[in-house]
Amino acid sequence: MAKPSHNIGAPERTNYTVIGDIVNTAQRVEGLGKQVAPDAEVVILASETVIAAMTLDVQYEPVGGFALNGRTKPVEVYPVFP
């Protein structure tokens, strides 16, 4: 069932954004890039939830659980290698 949409911002212009727990978790996982791979120019990180849902043939390796703001349990993080 779709959730009702809400307007955020001035009525003269429309801006689209995403909000919620999933978005917050993704942003915090993204912020771990320099910690997980400090010398990498680019790093792709995924949570355990994303890894479980992936259907692509990619390699990944666990680097451990990280305490993220707003989460009660550590989030398992995986660098992904295409």
Image (spheres, rainbow, N blue to C red):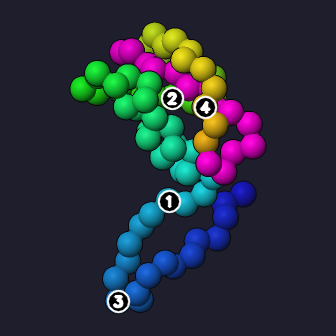
Q: Residues within 10 Å of mark 4 (few under 14, many from 20)?
A: some
Residue 18 percent across, percent down from the top left: 50, 59
Q: Which residue is mark 1?
A: 18
Residue 46: which numbered mark, if any? 2
Mark 3 to mark 2 CA distance (whole Å): 37 Å
The structure residue drawn at horizontal position 51% and vertical position 29%, both measured from the top left corner, is: 46
Q: Earlier in the sequence, mark 3 or mark 1?
A: 3
Circle 3: element type: loop
Label 1 environment density (alpha carbons within 10 Å; few <14, some 14–19, many ≥20)? few
Identity of the amino acid at label 3?
Answer: Glu
One can see residue 22 in this view: no
Give whichever of discs 1 and 4 has the lower sequence position.
1
Q: Secondary structure at mark 4?
A: strand
Of label 3 and label 2, which has the lower sequence position?
3
- In primary-sequence order, the first of circles 2 and 4 is 2
Q: Nearer the viewer, mark 1 or mark 2?
A: 2
Which of the two residues, 57 or 44, is positioned nearer the viewer here?
A: 44
In the image, which disc is placed on residue 12? 3
Q: Residue at 62% of width from left, 48% of height from top?
A: 69
Identified at 69% across, 45% down, the residue is 71
Q: Position of residue 6 (x, y in %)?
A: 57, 76
- Quadrant position of the C terminus in the picture: top left
Which residue type does callout 4 highlight?
Answer: Phe
Residue 20 % position (x, y): 60, 57
Instruction: Name above or below for residue 81 compared with residue 16.
Output: above
Mark 2 surroundings within 10 Å by alpha-carbon count, few (fewer than 14), some (14 through 19), many (20 or more): many
User: What residue is drawn where x is 44% and y is 41%?
Assistant: 31
Disc 1 from disc 2: Cα separation:
18 Å
Give amino acid for label 1.
Val
The stretch of residues the image draws in magenta is 69-82
Give residue 66's mark. Answer: 4
